[in-house]
Image: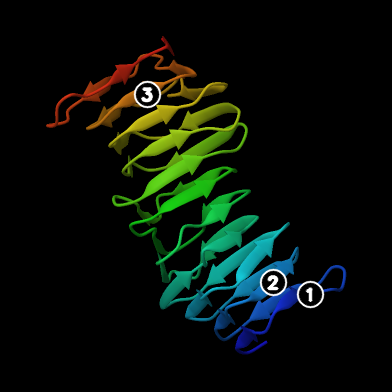
């Protein structure tokens, strides 16, 4: 497909065959009032993904953003993705709206800028040594057991919610950390990754530090530390 535009009211089912694999070589636009639903594997080779007032619901498989250049991604105020992958060594930038990702978030190649936004991810985060610019972003890790596989991870506020254990794979440099009831944050016994925190520590679940160090290095006062079940 070349450019894809969804307009008009009503539900648009994108890819009604089984198993459709959809490749978009141009841009994608969802206009106000359009409701798009799909469960297909999608490769997006364009430069602009723009949901400007419609809705996007992706129930299964993966949307792969594949480009060697700059890609602008406005997921829209009403959106849900299943898996998301980035490849092609491009620069992929989220803007305007928060993303809701219900499975894995993977950077195979390229740079991803997550913007001054709050993104929710329910699967594993697989970044490796690729560039993941997150310093102005809040994240909700809201699935079951999740691995956050990044190099050094710098972000604003992190909320560990949902269920299960969230497992770190690097040092975290963050503002506020919230661990909700029923959730464990684990630094990994073999590595004992540190956490550097400038804000509040709000633990209603559990925290396994192993031999890792938590450093409270904020400049504001007061700072709240609720350690609950921390070891």
Find the distance from the CA under tag 1 to the CA under tag 3: 44 Å
Examine the rendered structure and indicate whether residue 72 appears above or below residue 217.
below
Quadrant position of the N terminus in the picture = bottom right
* Mark toward the start of the polypeptide (3 vs 2): 2
Quadrant of residue 197 within the rendered picture = top left
Task: Give the farthest residue toward the bottom.
Answer: 2
Rendered-image quadrant of the C terminus: top left
Q: Residues within 10 Å of mark 1 (few under 14, many from 20)?
A: some
Q: Which residue is mark 1?
A: 15
Q: Nearer the viewer, mark 1 or mark 2?
A: 2
Residue 147 is situated, as x and y percent measured from the top left of the image, at: 53, 36
* Helix, strand or loop for disc 1: loop
The one of 173 and 191 positioned closer to us in this rendering:
173
Q: Secondary structure at mark 2?
A: strand
Q: Earlier in the sequence, mark 1 or mark 3?
A: 1
On screen, residue 227 above or below 96: above
The residue lying at 63 percent from left, 85 percent from top is 4
The residue singled out by tag 3 in the image is 202
> Gap in Å between the C-alphas at discs 3 and 2?
38 Å
The residue located at (22%, 24%) in the rendering is 223
The answer, for residue 86, to whether it is visible in the render is yes
Q: Give x and y (percent) for residue 160.
A: 48, 32
In this view of the protein, which residue sits in the foreground, 78 or 50?
A: 78
The residue to which callout 2 is attached is: 36
Q: CA distance from mark 1 to mark 2?
A: 10 Å
Dot 2: few (<14), some (14–19), or many (≥20) neighbours within 10 Å? Answer: some
Q: Nearer the viewer, mark 1 or mark 3?
A: 3
Q: Residues within 10 Å of mark 3 (few under 14, many from 20)?
A: some
Q: Position of residue 89 (x, y in %)?
A: 44, 69
The answer to whether the residue labelled 1 contacts the one labelled 2, judged by CB atoms less than 8 Å apart, is: no
């Amino acid at each position: 497909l070349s450019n894809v535009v969804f307009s008009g009211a009503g539900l648009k089912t994108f890819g009604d065959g089984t198993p459709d694999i959809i490749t978009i070589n141009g841009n994608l636009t969802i206009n106000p009032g359009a409701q798009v639903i799909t469960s297909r594997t999608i490769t997006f080779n364009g430069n602009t993904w723009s949901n400007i007032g419609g809705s996007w619901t992706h129930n299964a498989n993966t949307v792969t953003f594949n480009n060697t250049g700059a890609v602008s991604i406005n997921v829209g105020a009403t959106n849900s993705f299943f898996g998301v992958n980035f490849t092609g060594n491009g620069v992929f930038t989220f803007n305007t709206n928060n993303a809701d990702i219900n499975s894995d978030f993977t950077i195979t190649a390229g740079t991803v800028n997550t913007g001054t936004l709050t993104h929710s991810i329910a699967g594993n985060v697989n970044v490796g040594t690729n560039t993941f610019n997150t310093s102005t972003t809040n994240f909700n890790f809201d699935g079951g057991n999740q691995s956050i596989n990044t190099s050094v991870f710098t972000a604003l506020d992190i909320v560990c919610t949902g269920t299960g254990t969230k497992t770190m794979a690097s040092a975290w440099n963050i503002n506020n950390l919230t661990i909700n009831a029923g959730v464990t944050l684990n630094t990994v016994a073999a590595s004992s990754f540190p956490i550097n925190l400038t804000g509040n520590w709000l633990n209603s679940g559990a925290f396994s530090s192993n031999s890792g160090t938590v450093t409270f290095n904020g400049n504001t006062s007061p700072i709240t530390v609720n350690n609950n079940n921390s070891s």
